[in-house]
Image (cartoon, helix red, strand yellow):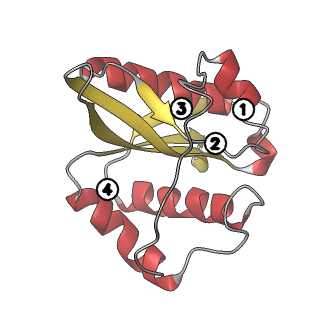
Amino acid sequence: MTITLTVADYDDPVHAAALLDVLDAYSRDPMGQQESLSAYVRDNLVEELNEFPTAVSILAFDGNTPVGLANCFLGFSTFKAKRLMNIHDLAVIPPYRGKGVGEMLLGAVEKKSIQLGCCKITLEVRDDNRAQKLYKRFGFLSDDPEMLFWSKPLDEA
């Protein structure tokens, strides 16, 4: 196994297909939504990411096989007056889990975040997700265990 990491070029058809394949595998997983990406998402996601100015995606490949993905978005910390990086998706396809790919992706996100002058990296994780062990090993912790992440869906696209 020789894993290579690259920042996705959304205009590259190989990168676009890899992003969609790994994200679809994650979507079908119990930690995802347990169903494939919708046709709308498959048809529009890469173009929308390409047009979204703060999107950063990092792909992991074993040779030509896409095996992992980190979709991230720059945000801003008003308390630090600096950028922050939010990991929105961290996905590794099942045969590659537990082999260090997730840690490699986190390392690449950290490196990119430092290059961009970010003060921290954030993420959300389900309370039943085994990836919490990886996140803790990598130095993530709950800023405030009393804080909850809430959302209000605006559409069903």
| Contact flag, marks 2 and 4 (Cβ < 8 Å) | no
Q: Secondary structure at mark 3?
A: strand
Q: Amino acid at mark 1?
A: Gln
Q: Secondary structure at mark 1?
A: helix
Mark linked to residue 125: 2
Q: Percent from the top left, x then y, of residue 32?
A: 67, 60
Q: Amino acid at mark 3?
A: Thr
Say which label, 4 or 1, has the lower sequence index.
4
Q: Secondary structure at mark 4?
A: loop
Image quarter in which the C terminus is found: bottom left
Mark linked to residue 10: 4
Residue ID at (72%, 36%): 131
Q: Percent from the top left, x then y, of residue 146?
A: 60, 33
Query: Which residue is denoted by mark 1 in the rendering?
Result: 132
Q: Nearer the viewer, residue 73 or 94?
A: 73
Say which label, 3 or 2, has the lower sequence index.
3
Say which label, 4 or 3, has the lower sequence index.
3
Say which label, 1 or 2, has the lower sequence index.
2
Q: To which quarter of the image does residue 116 belong?
A: top left
State the CA–CA distance, disc 4 to disc 1: 29 Å
Say which label, 1 or 3, has the lower sequence index.
3
**Mark 4 nearby-residue class (10 Å; few <14, some 14–19, many ≥20):** many
Residue ID at (47%, 63%): 17
- Asked if residue 124 lies left or right of residue 12, the reply is right
**Rendered view: 136 above or below 41:** above
- Asked if residue 61 lies left or right of residue 93, the reply is left
Q: Secondary structure at mark 2?
A: loop
Q: Can residue 2 be seen in the rendering of this structure?
A: no
